[in-house]
Image (cartoon, rainbow, N blue to C red):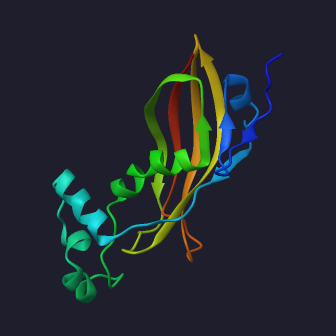
Amino acid sequence: MINVEPETSKAGKVVINNFEEFEKFVGKEIGVSEYLTITQKQINLFADATLDHQWIHTDPARAAVESQFKKTIAHGFLTMSVIPYLWHQIAEVNNIKMLVNYGIESLRFSQAVVVDSEVRMRVSLNSIANLRGIAKASLSATLEIKGNPKPAFDATIIFLYHFK
């Protein structure tokens, strides 16, 4: 008999070994990541990678004077780009040949992430479907900002897991 009860790894991650274990989380919170500090160096590197050097992100002196936040803020797309990193802190999905970032649905930015803020992601499983051997997981993700009651964003993210 296959064990279908999810376990927890030594690192505190939820361990998912197959579709049936994943399915146990439908309608439930899977977990919360550790906090990640968003630094000016990250923001600058992201600006270089995306060619988006808008002053609100890259000019601390100008932001201190002209921005309502009095500091630079992370690009919205930078905050989204840490989803895979934070997700891997929450769950360890084993026995897969491949994972595909399939899409982001109903994304809503609610709050700017000011430089040096600490963020973490809270994830629950909305649904999971078996598409001829490929698991399509729809996850509700909220990026929380430490000390701020309003999240940076709420989104539904879709991953495709090709289990072995």
Quarter placement of the C terminus:
top right
Q: Position of residue 43 (x, y in %)?
A: 28, 64
Residue shown at 17% from the left, 57% from the top = 48
Quick one: which residue is furthest to the right in this view?
Answer: 1
Number of marks in the rendered image = 0
Indicate whether 164 appears above or below 104.
Answer: above
Residue shown at 20% from the left, 85% from the top = 61
Q: Quadrant of residue 74?
A: bottom left
Query: Taking 28 as reference, is 100 left or right?
Result: left
Residue shown at 54% from the left, 46% from the top = 87
Indicate whether 162 appears above or below 152.
Answer: above
Quick one: which residue is furthest to the top in this view?
Answer: 132
Q: Position of residue 69 (x, y in %)?
A: 36, 81
Indicate whether 150 appears above or below 60.
Answer: above
Query: Taking 91 as reference, is 100 left or right?
Result: left
Q: Position of residue 162 (x, y in %)?
A: 52, 20
Quarter placement of the N terminus:
top right
Q: Position of residue 83 (x, y in %)?
A: 46, 49
Residue shown at 23% from the left, 80% from the top = 60
Query: Taking 140 as reference, is 45 left or right?
Result: left
